[in-house]
Image: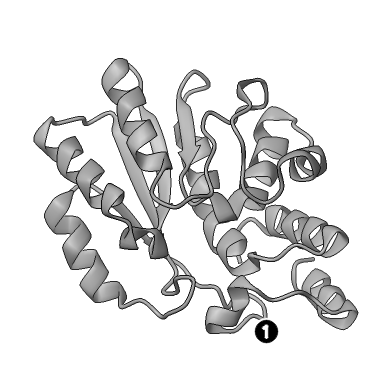
Amino acid sequence: MKNKDLKRRIIEISYKYKKYHLGSCLSAVDIIEEIYDLKREDEKFILSEGHAGLAFYCILEKHERRDPEYLLRRYGIHPSKDEKNGIWCTTGSLGQGLPVALGMAIADRSKNVYCMISDGECAEGSVWETLRIKTDLKVDNLKVYINLNGYGAYDAINPIQLTKRLKAFCPEINIRLTTVEQLPFLKGLDAHYHAMTDDEYKKALEILR
């Protein structure tokens, strides 16, 4: 399992504050880490998949020495714009972050703007409108990543079908197939809403040692 230290932090903080969205956070963190390894310090990242906010806060702790517990207490699981702490856009209402990232990329084409969306988020029309505009205007400095873990808020998602649609709109999109079932007590759709018991927390820490 990659990035065990980051996932351990997510587990520790989630358990301490009784927060959910573990499936989203654990499946997203590898992608956000990949982006932070690629992007320059003066380039922006937008987490459109706002419900993976705790994963983002833990990345900010690693790369920018921010306090993830402070960010979680102040903003909750969905980040709010806080440029001093490396958060460039308020997200949580799905489909909102990607259009903002497109605008930033058009405004300054000398820098890349990175944005991560979720598969469930693709139910929003704004995602498809933005991908079409990105392709039509050749906004190549907007780097879009999708966390395709196979589950939206209420239903399973067909990854093959969604991949075909995304590639048709935006051939250069970065699709990452992930899983919500990284720990034995996280299963399918329920992984997004699961609250750990004491025993599950201890088991998770053992796995992530």
Q: Position of residue 175 (x, y in %)?
A: 32, 57
* Residue 16 % position (x, y): 87, 60
Residue at screen point 44% across, 71% down: 152
Q: Residues within 10 Å of mark 1 (few under 14, many from 20)?
A: few
In terms of image quadrants, where is residue 111? top left
Residue at 32%, 57% in the rendered image: 124
Q: Is residue 6 above or below residue 19?
A: above
Horizontal arrangement in the rendering, residue 194 relative to residue 105 (left or right): right
Q: Quadrant of residue 58?
A: top right
Left or right of 108? Residue 64 is right
Residue identifier under label 1: 184
Please name the amino acid that badge 1 sits on: Pro
Is residue 109 in view?
no
Secondary element type, mark 1: loop
**Nearest the eye: 104 or 26:** 104
In the image, what residue occupies the spot 83% across and 74% down? 201
Q: Residue 115: percent from the left, percent from the top? A: 41, 40
Instruction: Please say if 3 is above or below 186.
Output: above
Percent across and percent down for residue 112 are 35, 26
| Residue 14 drawn above or below residue 89 | below
> Does the image show residue 203?
yes
Q: Report the residue at 32% width, 26% height from top.
A: 103
Give the quarter of the figure containing the C terminus.
bottom right
